[in-house]
Image (spheres, helix red, strand yellow):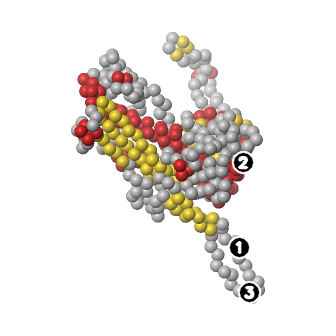
Amino acid sequence: MSAEGHPFMSYAGGNSPGRFIESNVVGDVPLDFDDGLLQRAQYDTSTEAHVNAIFTATLYAQYNQEHEWYNALSQVDRFSASLDGPVTAKAYRAATDPVDLQTHTEGGPVPDGQTMGVEKVKFDPKRSDTVIEVSDLQEIYAAIEDAVGFEEFWQTQQEQLDLAIDRDGLAKAVMAGDDQYGATDQLTSLDRVIASSDEEGQAQDPNGTAYNDGDLDYGNIDRSADDWADSYVDFNAAETRQLNNDLFTGFLNSMNEFADVDVYNDTAILTGHDTAGVLSELAADRNNVRNQAAMADYRREEVGDAETIRGLSGTARFRDYDGIPIIGNQHAIKHGDISSIFIVPTDTIRGQPRLAIEQFQEPYVETAGRGQSQGYLATGNYRDEALMKLDHEAVNRDFSSGGLLRDIAE
């Protein structure tokens, strides 16, 4: 299955992060997701750094803008009933303990009624904020010379919020002794969202330290006691394993037996660029990809005043593994020598995404300064200021639909 046709690309049951923001705060925040930051100014805390000494000089942002894991998960608004099916808030009920087969003796009584087990699951809203400010003098400079104004910085900072959510939230590794779930304010890491009781009890954190009881708790889930909330986690506490086709296909096949989701059609792979490259090579080997071309196609290519060796320009690099899209991220979690592999569901369960960033309130935006409802007298400073606040959480509504392959090496 091609990446274009994969359900993952449709953001099952929700919106992409960009579409979510555009739908809720466009008009308040000057958004332009297509232009990137090629000619944005260098970001600095000092006013002087935003003003060029040489007019018309181009400044470049010193950032890597990659936040692929955050982009990969759908955004679902829980503050308006916009989805088909039951729209819930921050809690739901999970079914456990399937009923046993009942029987009776010849002429015996009708058995008592049975019911599945029911567990209550709830999460705490987490807060993601971004605040910017530029001086009144800087705004004047922006109008008369090559300086950076409020509008441009507001757009840049909004894009940086996505990066921070990804880097410091979703893709932040859980270390032994870290603050437990109830004591953290940032969006919960996939390291907690997709985990198991055995992992917490027997595996080690990225530094090689054994986890403490409670380190991988998530919401009101106690990992050491609530094994019904286990995701499929393949770990090795003793040593790393070489990532090869046998290991990975064995992991996928075992997870497919364990999971409530079709691993080969309704999931995506979230990992680092290092592991993504290995998976791509493994997929190419697995599919026996070969390049064939006539000698007439062999040529050189100029690079400045130099030339390459004579040959072909092409690739046999795979962007998926057995049809499962591979999403590489700069800020991936690494439990072994290379980045771990998270398998995330991309479909819905009764109309609800199995795993998504759920927004509990409409994004809050506030501005102050010249021409705003709150002016200089309200703030006490000659500055233009802006605030954006998101109240959200990474919510897993089907624990068995996620997987993690960790403790791996190239």
Which numbered tag is attached to residue 101? 1
Residue at the limit of the structure toward the bottom, as seen here = 107
Q: Which residue is mark 2?
A: 202
Mark 2 burial class by Cα count in 10 Å: few <14, some 14-19, many 20+? some
Name the amino acid type tagged 1.
Answer: Leu
Q: Secondary structure at mark 2?
A: helix
Closer to the observer: label 1 or label 2?
Answer: 2
Rendered view: 355 above or below 379:
below
The residue sitting at 73% across, 79% down in the picture is 103
Name the one closer to the observer, 242 or 383: 383
Q: Which residue is identified by label 3? A: 108
Q: Secondary structure at mark 3?
A: loop
Q: Are marks 2 and 3 in contact (CB under 8 Å)?
A: no
The residue type indicated by label 2 comes to Gln
Q: Residue at x 47, y 33 (%)?
A: 65
Which label belongs to residue 231?
none
SS assignment at label 1: loop
State the image coordinates of residue 97 (x, y, percent, origin top left): 66, 66
- The spot of residue 124 in percent (x, y) is 50, 54
Determine the CA span between mark 3 and mark 1: 16 Å
Q: Amino acid at mark 3?
A: Gly
Q: Residues within 10 Å of mark 3 (few under 14, many from 20)?
A: few
Q: Is residue 374 left or right of residue 293?
A: left
Between residue 378 and residue 293, name the one nearer to us.
378
- Chain-order first, disc 1 or disc 2: 1
Identify whether 278 is placed above or below 100: above
Nearer to the camera, 378 or 162: 378
